[in-house]
Image: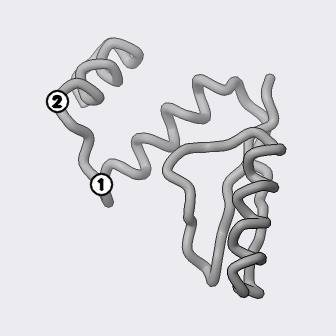
């Protein structure tokens, strides 16, 4: 099981996919270096990396629809239509 993270700035999630701890920290530092004060790194609950990324993509789909290739890959992982 991997530990995955997401970064929030001013209540807005700023990464497009889940990150490892080092990359999440680097992204958060970029925002704090730019003067943002409300920067949070959040650890996502324990699960396999594939499960978390899949869940994350499905949640993001309502905001940013998947392109045809991404949708096909997701359908292959799920074994059903999305």
Give the number of marks. 2
Helix or strand or loop: what does disc 2 sit on?
helix
* Residue 2 screen position, x and y as percent: 79, 28
Tell me which residue sits at (29%, 28%) in the image: 70
Q: Which residue is mark 1?
A: 64
Name the quarter where the N terminus is drawn.
top right
Q: Quadrant of residue 45?
A: top right
**Going by the image, does 68 lie left or right of 33?**
left
Q: Between residues 1 and 26, which one lies in front from this camera angle?
A: 26
Q: Which residue is mark 2?
A: 68
In this picture, residue 78 sits left or right of residue 68? right
Residue at point 77%, 70% (across, down): 40
Specify whether 67 is left or right of 27. left
In the picture shown, does residue 25 fall above or below 37? above
Above or below 71: residue 59: below
**Looking at this view, is 30 or 22 the one in front?**
30
- Residue 29 rendering spot, x and y as whole percentages: 79, 66
Q: Which mark is residue 77?
A: none
Inter-mark Cα distance, 1 to 2: 13 Å
| Residue 61, position as x, y percentages in the image | 32, 48
Residue nearest the viewer, comparing 18 with 24: 24
Asked if the residues shown at circle 1 and circle 2 are in contact, with their CB atoms under 8 angstroms apart, the answer is no
Quadrant of residue 41 within the rendered picture: bottom right
Of helix, strand and loop, which one carries label 1?
loop
Q: Is residue 61 above or below residue 11?
A: above
Q: Quadrant of residue 82?
A: top left
């Amino acid at each position: 099981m991997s530990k995955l993270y997401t970064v929030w700035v001013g209540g807005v999630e700023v990464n497009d996919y889940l990150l490892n701890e080092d990359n999440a920290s680097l992204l958060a530092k970029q925002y704090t270096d730019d003067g943002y004060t409300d920067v949070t790194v959040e650890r996502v609950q324990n699960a396999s990396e594939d499960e978390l990324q899949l869940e994350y993509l499905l949640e993001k789909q309502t905001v940013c629809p998947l392109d045809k290739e991404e949708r096909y890959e997701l359908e292959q992982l799920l074994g059903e239509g999305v």
